Image: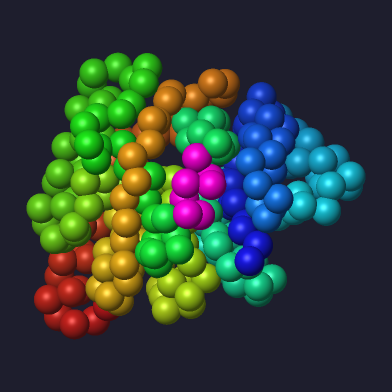
Amino acid sequence: MRALVVIPTYNEIGNVGKIIDAALGVSEITEVLIVDDNSPDGTGAAADNMAKSNPRVHVMHRAGKMGLGSAYIEGFRYALDKGYGYIFEMDADFSHDPAEIPRFLEAAKEADVVIGSRYVDGIRILNWPLKRLMLSYFASVYARTITGLKLCDTTGGYKCFRREALLKLDLSRIHSDGYSFQIEMNFLCQKKGLKLKEIPIVFSDRRAGISKMNKGIIFEALAVVWLLKIKSILGIL
């Protein structure tokens, strides 16, 4: 089965070509979909140039900066429409190492969703300031406590879904972004009885460009966990 690596981008001109080459280089079955939010720095055009010469590279252009969650949802729909068997989430900035893709595919033989975990078997994050590390770690603990997620890393964004797993979700009802998107996807998969498996990864700070993290993403995640909890109690998920 083919695997599609969905990579949202916004101003990633310094990374996009390298991340595409790296993701394609680890396996003959991998293809890449760049979902670009009309990057002013030319990221989308650079991806288009690569797609012209390589049929394993695909590009989706969106009108503007519409958010990480919706980028992944559109990427998932594309993957399902085109018949891919495995669908990945991956950041464009090399904080997620493409060399780990074969490990995800191997784990996906026995799991519906494979999550690259920064916090299973210890903390595996490089080059983050202590403040950001603590924020990320305790955000994951907070989400796990409120929602009952059986994961060490509830907010990690390096994942592999089996096709059948995504088909069981109503993607049209998912509207969260950033950390909260990852929490919501994990929560819905767990509620559907899907098998989630964490594998340890090393997470490194981005190689180039500027982080998209902001206070709005953090506050949204704090609220969404309670919304998920309430919806679950009311039976409306």
Answer with left or right where residue 58 lies relative to residue 205. right
Q: How is the image coloured?
A: rainbow
Residue pictured at 24% horizontal, 40% vertical: 120
**Residue 210 visible, this orientation:** yes
Residue 122 lies, in percent from the top left, at: 21, 32
**Residue 172 visible, this orientation:** no
The outermost residue toward the bottom is 235
Q: Nearer the viewer, residue 125 or 216?
A: 125
Residue 11 lies, in percent from the top left, at: 63, 32
Answer with left or right where residue 208 lies relative to residue 17. left
Residue 198 lies, in percent from the top left, at: 31, 50
Q: Nearer the viewer, residue 201 or 64?
A: 201
Residue 185 lies, in percent from the top left, at: 36, 62
Name the quadrant of the N terminus: bottom right
The outermost residue toward the right is 53
Residue 102 is one of the magenta-drawn residues: yes
Which stretch is magenta?
A: 100-106
16 lies above or below 230: above
Residue pictured at 16% horizontal, 37% vertical: 138
Answer with left or right where residue 148 lies relative to residue 4. left
Answer with left or right where residue 122 lies relative to residue 61. left
Residue 105 is one of the magenta-drawn residues: yes
40 lies above or below 109: above
Number of marks present in the image shown: 0
175 lies above or below 216: below
Secondary structure predominantly adopted by residues drawn in magenta: helix
